[in-house]
Amino acid sequence: MTVTVGVHRSNPSLYHLARLDYLQQELAPLGESAEFHHYADGTRTGAYLADGTIDFGGTGSTPPITAQAAGHDIVYTAVSAPRPDHGALLVAADGPIASVADLKGATVVLAVGSWQTHLLAKSLDQHGLSYRDDITAERPARDEAERLRSGAIAGWIAQGAELAAARRTGEFRELIRTTDVITDRSVFFARRELAVRRPEVVAAIVAALQRADHWAAAHPEEAAALAAADQGGEAADWHTALTALPWQLEPATAEFVAEQQEAADIFHRVGFIDRPVTVADIHLPALEQPVADAISRAGKGN
């Protein structure tokens, strides 16, 4: 069969995998072939798995929760190590927002439905505020840095090269640092049928991803230049952002399930998802060892 892996720019592991030969190399001994399906919006990953467009995909922490809430039959396969410096909620350095409590009634720009929703919802919840009731969440539209400078918005969750560029200006303060609130992992998930019937295929995909991560860690200048040419921004800012990532995968364990369950409970409480979900229902403990073995093998250069 041909295994289709979804790729979007927001997931750097998949972004690099699609530009290397590792997936084909890992699947060939199993008699399988691979192709990539490129799309712009990572929040569509669950829907693409559900309708068969892709067999395997990856996002941040929020999309698999919303996919489960929508009834899509997916399972977790692997996660990245925590990404402590991947993003932050920025406010104007000399502006009126001095604490999370000051966000009440304010407009915050973020990639709604991404891991950024998890970051903001949990941070507000920790301070007795509600993502639904106490802030206005707005999707990025134009120059968010300029809007923040002018006071048109109160906060902006930035990540990657945009965050590195914003930090260079000295004009913004980090009100919420990712590492203080969530682990902010990359999360990889697949169609349940594939994971149950062909766990060796899932393990092979994870091995290829880990090899792609090792490539990115070993070639930061090349990876940064590729991202800048394809996605815009300065190569130096991409280099800063990419070298801050862990480039290490792990199996999806009970500890990770607990992290996701906490997020899912918050999302349901504030109405971001319309029904409660039990995250353990899409966790396959039987996948943990094959995935761990694949990651270990990839780490040895095979």
Image (cartoon, helix red, strand yellow):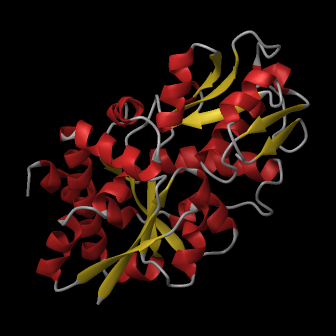
The x, y position of residue 301, in whole percent, is 8, 52
Q: Quadrant of residue 63?
A: bottom right
Q: Quadrant of residue 87?
A: top right
Residue closest to the eye, 205 or 174: 174
Furthest residue toward bottom: 1
Furthest residue toward top: 94
Eyeballing the image, is 204 above or below 155?
A: below
Residue closest to the eye, 207 or 200: 207
Eyeballing the image, is 233 above or below 49?
A: above
The x, y position of residue 111, in whole percent, is 66, 48
Residue closest to the eye, 112 or 139: 139
Residue 272 visible to an observer of this rendering: yes
Please tell me which residue is depicted at 31% across the width and 42% down the height of the picture: 225
Please tell me which residue is depicted at 70% across the width and 29% down the height of the picture: 146
Eyeballing the image, is 182 above or below 248?
A: above
Residue 248 visible to an observer of this rendering: no
Q: Is residue 120 left or right of residue 64?
A: right
Please tell me which residue is depicted at 51% across the width and 40% down the height of the picture: 184
Q: Is residue 91 left or right of residue 164?
A: right
Eyeballing the image, is 164 above or below 282?
A: above
Q: Quadrant of residue 138?
A: top right
The x, y position of residue 3, in whole percent, is 33, 81
Quadrant where the image shows the N terminus: bottom left
